[in-house]
Amino acid sequence: MSRRLTGAAAVLACAVLACGGLVAGCGSQPARVTGTGSPPVTAPLSTSLVTAQGTWAVAVMGGPDAGSKFWQLFFRPATSGRWSLVTPQGVADNGGLVAAGGRAYLVVGFRPSQNLAFSPLATSTDTGRNWTPGLLDAGLADTPGAIAVGPSGRILALLQDGTIQAASTASDAAAGRWAPLTTFKALAASAPGRACGLEGVTAVSFGPDENPMAAGSCARPGAAGVFTDAGGTWRSAGLALPGGGRVRVLGLTALADGNEALLATRHSLLAAWWDGTRWTVSGPVTAGGMRALGFGSGGSAWLLPGVGRAESIAGPGSAWRALPPIPAGTGTLAPGAGGSYDALAVSGSRLTVWRLAQRAWGKIQQISVPLQYGSSG
């Protein structure tokens, strides 16, 4: 399998590799959080997403016992049940990977690690066989919702300090042509930001009208910080939960006719769906901590808690469904056909894929990942 970095951005890739991939001793300083509010509430980076090409999963390999963590990207084509390793090569991925899909491509961002103060990017139009390098001259936020790709090809990136940057196309993103959309300070000072007591930004997305969206955590009890940008003016999307308590938006994604959010209160987790006018909120599910979460097709979602059973939900109007106890070492889940799921279990450099069929997990595949322990990626 070839996962080469190709295209017109080769010179840019050399600069990225020289500082971030193969040499850990550059003089850059790690990006700092400069927002005036509390640090953003983050969700685990382990996740999966579904595009027209198939299903992508982000999982962390190695681990403390192996001396280092290595974030990896895997792909399962829509026409096949087999997974393959498609992580872009040549850039350090110890800081974590963030991924978002468009109609014909996938964008992967590398979070800063070691002395790297910016985020290299990679874009693939051929299901991860080849990658075009790019650059975001700042560090991506530590959340799976830090990148969003709109139907028109516009890309949003959420930075560590809560700033949201925008690129008009994947080509602009590859060339490093980003423009600021808003900052945490400006969003928190807006009318809807003040109304909810915005404390941090955790995700970006696009609404049904392709307007940019942002989500975060609010201090005001019951208020869920989901905002939409209409011509430069940020407005609340009107999501609120009864019963009080602070609400954190763990994830936000675009659907064919709206959006879906995953929410956390002090004692429960919920899903919510927006049709551009009104929200439908699921019943709550209790979970201890969070190991991974993600969205599927048709408004579905899944949660992999640190303690307790994994949960899935099929869409608006449905209830949470507890999955059978997951195999040991499972780091992330990936939705399949007919409500099935794959569990991606990690042991050092080995990935074992288990598939749920008739309420039981069956082993279907193993992948050995060539990790260079003691290296930067």
Image (cartoon, grey):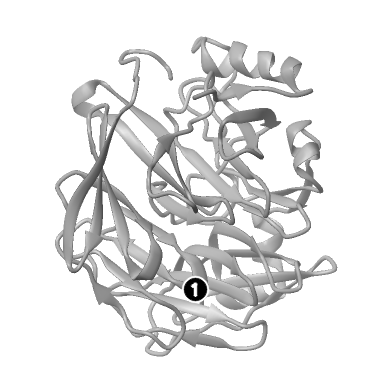
Q: Which residue lies furthest to the right in this view?
A: 231
Q: Which residue is drawn at 42% across and 28% down?
A: 94
Mark 1, other Cα within 10 Å: few <14 / some 14–19 / many ≥20? many
* Residue 127, image x, y percentages: 57, 40
Residue at left 38%, top 13%? 375
Instruction: Indicate whether 126 appears above or below 13.
Output: below
- State whether residue 289 appears in this view: yes
Taking the image as shown, residue 90 lies to the left or right of residue 135, namely left
Q: Residue at x 43, y 73 (%)?
A: 247
Going by the numbered disc 1, the residue's amino acid type is Gly
Q: What element carries label 1?
A: helix
Residue 81: percent from left, percent from top:
38, 49
- State the residue in front, 85 or 97: 85
The residue carrying mark 1 is 299
Say which quarter of the image contains residue 176: top right
The x, y position of residue 130, in whole percent, is 61, 28
Give whichever of 160, 105 is nearer the camera.
105
Residue nearest the observer in this picture, 74 or 218 = 74
Residue 187 figure quarter: bottom right
- Return the residue nearer the eye: 181 or 18: 18
Above/below status of 242 relative to 34: below
The location of residue 188, given as percent across then percent down, is 64, 64
Residue 218 in sight from this viewpoint:
no
Q: In this view, does 179 lie above or below 369?
A: below
Q: Residue at x 45, y 82 (%)?
A: 222
